[in-house]
């Protein structure tokens, strides 16, 4: 068994254990209003962090390029309450146009 398979089996065991422990938590802790607020905010925080990292870093280094302009246009479109399709298309067009320059 090489290192790759040890990593696969180890990661699988950890994932199974975490899922099992998640199902073992008593319901009174999960229905707590504070816990419900936290659970609704976690995906937003994770997605924001992912967008931030993917926008301004490349191979571990800070980069300011067309992606940042695309995110800025998307934020402006969101602040103007544009539909999701318009936000994505406007950000993509901005990034593509600046990339071609």
Image (cartoon, rainbow, N blue to C red):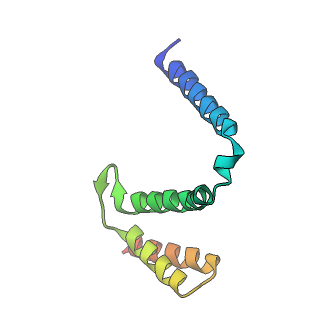
x 42%, y 77%: residue: 72
- Residue 5 vs 72, above or below: the answer is above
**Residue 6 % position (x, y):** 52, 19
Residue 78 occupies which quadrant of the picture?
Answer: bottom right
Q: Residue furthest bottom?
A: 80
- The image position of residue 56, as x and y in percent, is 35, 62
Q: Nearer the viewer, residue 60 or 100?
A: 60
Q: Residue furthest top?
A: 1
**Residue 78, placed above or below residue 2:** below
Q: Position of residue 15 (x, y in %)?
A: 60, 32
As displayed, is residue 96 above or below residue 80?
A: above
Viewer-side residue, 93 vs 48:
48
Residue 24, percent from left and from top: 68, 35
Residue visible at 64% across and 30% down?
Answer: 16
Q: How many marks?
A: 0
Q: Quadrant of the C terminus?
A: bottom left
Q: Quick check: 65 above or below 57? A: below
> For residue 97, what is the image quadrant?
bottom left
């Amino acid at each position: 068994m090489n290192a790759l398979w040890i990593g696969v089996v180890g990661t699988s065991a950890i994932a199974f254990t975490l899922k099992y422990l998640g199902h073992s938590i008593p319901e009174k802790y999960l229905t707590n209003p504070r816990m419900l607020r936290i659970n609704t905010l976690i995906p937003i925080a994770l997605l924001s962090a992912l967008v931030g990292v993917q926008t301004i870093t490349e191979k571990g280094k800070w980069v300011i390029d067309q992606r940042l302009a695309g995110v800025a246009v998307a934020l402006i479109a969101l602040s103007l309450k544009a539909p999701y399709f318009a936000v994505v298309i406007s950000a993509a067009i901005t990034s593509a146009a600046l990339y071609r320059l």
